[in-house]
Amino acid sequence: MKKLFLLLITLTVTFISYGQTLFTYGNHKVAATEFLDAYNKNKTNVADSSQALRDYLNLYVKFKLKVQAAKDLHLDTLPSLEADLHNFRSQIEGNYLKDDKETKRLTDEAFERSQKDIHVVYFFEPVGVDSDTSITYNAIKELYQELKKKQLSDEEIIAQLNKGSVQIQKNDAGYITAFTLPYEFENIVYNLKPGHVSAPYRTKKGWFIFKNTGERHAVGKITIAQILFAIPEGHSQGKDRIKKTADSVYNALRNGADFGDLAKQFSDDRSTFYNGGKLPEFGTAKYDSIFEDHAFALKKDGEISAPFETEFGYHIIERVSAAPVPATQKDEAFMYNLKQDVANDSRIHIAQKKFVTEIVPIIGSKKLNVNQKDLWVVTDSSLMRDKNVTIDKINENTSLFTYNNNTSVKVRDWILYLRNLNSTISGNRAAYYETEFKRFSDASAVSNYASRLEEFSPAFKSQIREFTEGNMLFEVMQRKVWGKASSDTMGLKDFYNQHKEKYFWNSSAEAIIFSCSNKDVATDAMQQLRAGKTWKEILSESPSKVQADSGRYELGQIPVVDRTYFTKGLITAPVINKNDGTAVFAQIIKLYPDHQQRSFEDARGLVINDYQSYLEQKWVSQLEKKYPVKINEKVFQGLLK
């Protein structure tokens, strides 16, 4: 009981600490939550976490002092920084304008559906403008009942029903997977058991009934190469000759002939023959079902099919590679692509609609009472005649929606929205306006919410603050430290003369360092050096393959293999980059002993770096006097606990 009590006390203290001020600088406060947010994003695994937290606190205090100096100079109002912030905000705000839970549900659903392919047959009854809807409905309803009975074949049922205006069609969609069909159809199909049919489903074009004729474990994606022996349309008399050619090529392949060579020689597929017949990777429902069945029947890479026929001619295919569907969501690349598919599919509108529903009460969205018929007349006048009219007090300045931040959306915003759609209005204009007005209402709500994201999302507010302060820090450091150190030649020389004892050479060499495109190029360049060519001659002959820099380098700066003994005239063994295959070697011209004094020019880079540190420390000391820093040790100790 005592342990539980102490634990509760510790948790309470820690929770309170998070919400309190951790430190102040002048009149400015920094909350523990802000500090911890920054620390957790930048921390690394260390043995002494308490010391790491203390060290980071010291860095963060200095960071806030520098940012405050930038604010004092009003650097946040610079047009370049404002433009950077605007671009950054545009890039990230989309991450906060969606329902994450619903998006995740849709992604999980798509993943689950991606685990199996379904063979789909569908029945379609078109509904024309002049059709008798009762007749078509009765026919599709009867079809549904007969299909459930399974007493007659599909063709027999359709033959009985197709009379007069009833024209039912049966189509085989082959195997489908997630994202193959429109989402509304996919939902129907993936809720069917094998052998079952769906209830009639009405669309604008007509009635649909779907049938699950079988399922299989998802085949994933495959890459194949093909040799196509095309049968020209209307030339069926040459079919036997083409088949014999296909058989002959197949026999050659079985006897060890190269598939790519024969594809270049025989394939009629003009888009792939030149690269050995290789097609881009594809999955279920990309090509003709017969073609896909043969492709996915190949069980191992390099396996070749016998010639088979489709509507395009005879094919011989070879499996190049296959990518099965992962059984879990641990495959990051697969899940990333799946999330992109969800985001680009119509199903994402579900998450978007739910998001709008959730934000409406937050932003206090209120639709004002405006007569729609009068609004459509005003809209027509503006769009068709570019004339602003007033109909029963409604004109382009009339408010349509208001929000709880004292902003409103007016008729002119609605008209501008329609103009930007740049679409031709056909059919019933009132119906078109009504549909678009609902979308405009949602878009306006999202726009208002987006403009106030800092109010509603602490994470977004934190990201914006971090970017803004980071940009300001860079600008103020450039002005106060980096730029000043680089351009202050007199200051640099004075600093060098005061600290000469720091700038000595370790063991060094005058050397030429060669960077080559690969090992063979490096070997050739080394042979040319040994034969007496100068490094400049070698560069002039192969400028795209060899580059070189000459100068004095400390021995530790020269890239070499382990245990290299440096001597005058040495050409070092090439060091190969494992990532890109490039090779680096050096020619040693002259050696120098340890601890020789560097001249100002030799030490300039080191001096600039040290001078920058000196200027920064001096500047921070001034800022600490201007904005005295006070650490709340009690809150800090609470964070440690």
Image (tube, rainbow, N blue to C red):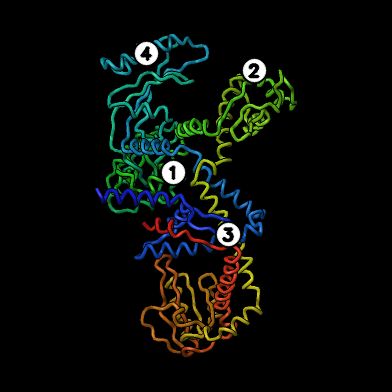
Tag 4–tag 2 contact (CB < 8 Å): no
Q: Residue at x 31, y 40 (%)?
A: 219
Write down the quadrant of residue 483 in the picture: bottom right
Disc 2 from disc 3: Cα separation: 61 Å
Label annotation for residue 373: 2
Residue that carries the numbered disc 3 in the rendered image: 26
Relative to 597, residue 135 above or below:
above
Q: Amino acid at mark 3?
A: Gly
Going from the N terminus, do you reach mark 1 or mark 4 first? 4
Q: SS at mark 3?
A: loop
409, 572: nearer the viewer: 409
> Do the CB atoms of the residues marked 1 and 2 lie less than 8 Å apart?
no
Residue for badge 1? 269
Name the secondary structure under disc 4. Answer: helix
Mark 1 vs 3: CB contact within 8 A: no
Location of residue 608 in the rendering, given as x and y in whole percent from the top left corner: 58, 75
Q: Is residue 133 left or right of residue 484?
A: left
Q: Which residue is pictured at 59% across the width and 32% down the height?
A: 403
Q: In the image, is residue 477 above or below residue 419?
A: below
Q: CA distance from mark 4 to mark 3?
A: 79 Å
- Nearer the observer: mark 1 or 2; the answer is 2
Where in the figure is residue 366, as x and y percent of width and height? 58, 27
Residue at which label 4 appears: 141
- Front: mark 1 or 3: 3
